[in-house]
Image (cartoon, grey):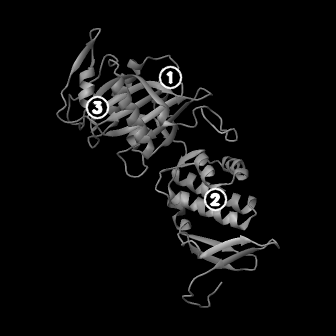
């Protein structure tokens, strides 16, 4: 895994880069949309691994990368069903892809209610930077696509022609994505993306009922933890007033950005001086902040609207975070004190309580 020498977090799979995914084998099952009252409706399960096709493999890799580019949640088993254990045994070579995919096809069918979209379940083996992974895609099945069954050693599967017609049109939507790997301590680590859900949410039926997983960190709590830990670092470990203001502005800007994910490595490179980077990352890790996390500013939304400087004499200066350049400036004086200057037209002056 590529890392800067100052940036170390245990476990080779902790940092997941969707761009490094390589898909090698896959099995496709059709999961129909059905209401429980419709008796006799069953998933159409393949009996063999699909014939390999490089174009289709690249298609799956692009869909995984695109989905995780919009949202990415790290997950862990929650102990509710056997899916994580089955995935782990497959990664360890104790269960083959075909048997696992059939089990997952049945599990997904049972997990869905009639309100859930039908589609195709693709269970895939591959590599991430050389390490084995197992990925699950729930894809839209386009209406009108011709069903083309094929026989591989007398067993039914989806033909290469069918996959070309269905997938390589570029219109196929991704409903759900999960990627799993075996961590260094032989536990299961995973990442999930749900392009169907609003914002960065993950549908409970897919995360819990089907995969038997839970979020490793709640986005709201983790985002608040990062904000609190960053402000503590700035106030306690940064002495230069101008740098304090610059770092605080950078933290607020990062949390106000539209990006769904905060990556510490990118944040410190873009915003912190070299001498402060390792100390900042160490402070975040000591506070329980992962090297990357999905952000949700719901708990701290009001705190991201304004900056406030509070001085020992009791003076407080507060202003919007999007203040134009040149209105407010902060710098240190040679006597160790801080000078804050405001250049603007005075709008109103009034007395107020403490």
State the quadrant of the C terminus. bottom right
Distance between mark 3 and mark 2 Cα atoms: 46 Å
In the picture provided, is 290 more to the left or to the right than 17?
Answer: right
Residue at 47 percent across and 35 percent down: it is 19
Q: Quadrant of residue 196?
A: top left
Residue at 47 percent across and 43 percent down: it is 72
Q: Nearer the viewer, residue 242 or 74?
A: 242
Distance between mark 1 and mark 3 Cα atoms: 28 Å
In the picture provided, is 183 more to the left or to the right than 164?
Answer: right
Q: Given contact means CB atoms under 8 Å apart, are the residues at marks 2 and 1 in contact?
A: no
Distance between mark 2 and mark 1 Cα atoms: 38 Å
Q: Residues within 10 Å of mark 2 (few under 14, many from 20)?
A: some
Q: Residues within 10 Å of mark 1 (few under 14, many from 20)?
A: many
Q: Nearer the viewer, residue 36 or 76?
A: 76
Residue at 21 percent across and 36 percent down: it is 37
Q: Nearer the viewer, residue 172 or 204?
A: 172
Residue at 66 percent across and 61 percent down: it is 231
Task: State the SS at label 1.
Answer: helix
Q: Sequence-wise, which precedes: disc 1 or disc 3?
A: 1
Q: Sequence-wise, which precedes: disc 3 or disc 2?
A: 3
| Residue position marked by numbered label 1 in the rendering | 91
Task: State the SS at label 2.
Answer: helix
| Residue position marked by numbered label 2 in the rendering | 228
Counting from the top left corner in percent of width and height, residue 35 is at: 23, 38
Q: Residue furthest right?
A: 335
| Residue position marked by numbered label 3 in the rendering | 168
Q: Residues within 10 Å of mark 3 (few under 14, many from 20)?
A: some
Q: Sequence-wise, which precedes: disc 2 or disc 1?
A: 1
- Which tag is nearer the camera, tag 3 or tag 2? 3
């Amino acid at each position: 895994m590529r890392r800067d020498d100052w940036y170390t977090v245990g476990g080779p799979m902790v940092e997941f880069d969707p761009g490094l995914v390589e898909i090698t084998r896959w099995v496709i099952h059709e999961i129909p949309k059905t209401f429980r009252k419709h008796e006799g409706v069953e998933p159409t399960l393949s009996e063999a691994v699909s014939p390999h096709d490089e174009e289709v493999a690249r298609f799956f890799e692009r869909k995984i990368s695109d989905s995780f580019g919009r949202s990415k949640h790290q997950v862990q088993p929650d102990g509710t069903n056997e899916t994580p254990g089955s995935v782990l045994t497959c990664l360890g070579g104790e269960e083959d892809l075909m048997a696992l995919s059939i089990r997952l096809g049945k599990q997904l069918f049972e997990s869905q209610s009639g309100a859930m979209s039908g589609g195709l379940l693709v269970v895939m083996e591959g590599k991430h930077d050389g390490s084995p992974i197992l990925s699950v895609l729930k894809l839209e099945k386009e209406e009108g696509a011709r069903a083309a069954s094929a026989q591989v050693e007398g067993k039914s599967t989806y033909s290469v022609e069918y996959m070309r017609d269905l997938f390589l049109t570029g219109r196929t939507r991704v409903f759900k994505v999960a990627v799993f790997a075996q961590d260094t301590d032989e536990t299961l680590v995973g990442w999930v993306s749900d392009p169907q859900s609003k914002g960065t949410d993950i549908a409970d039926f897919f995360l819990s009922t089907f995969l038997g997983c839970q979020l490793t960190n709640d986005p709201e709590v983790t985002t608040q933890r990062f904000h609190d830990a960053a402000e503590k670092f700035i106030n306690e470990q940064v002495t230069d007033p101008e740098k304090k203001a610059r770092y605080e502005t950078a933290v607020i800007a990062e949390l106000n950005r539209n990006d769904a994910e905060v990556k510490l490595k990118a944040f410190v490179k873009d915003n912190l001086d070299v001498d402060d980077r390792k100390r900042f990352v160490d402070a975040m890790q000591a506070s329980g902040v992962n090297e990357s996390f999905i952000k949700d500013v719901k708990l701290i939304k009001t705190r991201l609207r304004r900056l406030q400087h509070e001085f020992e004499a009791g003076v407080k200066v507060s202003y919007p975070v999007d203040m134009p350049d040149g209105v407010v400036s902060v710098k240190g004086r040679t006597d160790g004190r801080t000078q804050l200057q405001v250049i603007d037209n005075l709008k109103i002056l009034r007395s107020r309580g403490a």
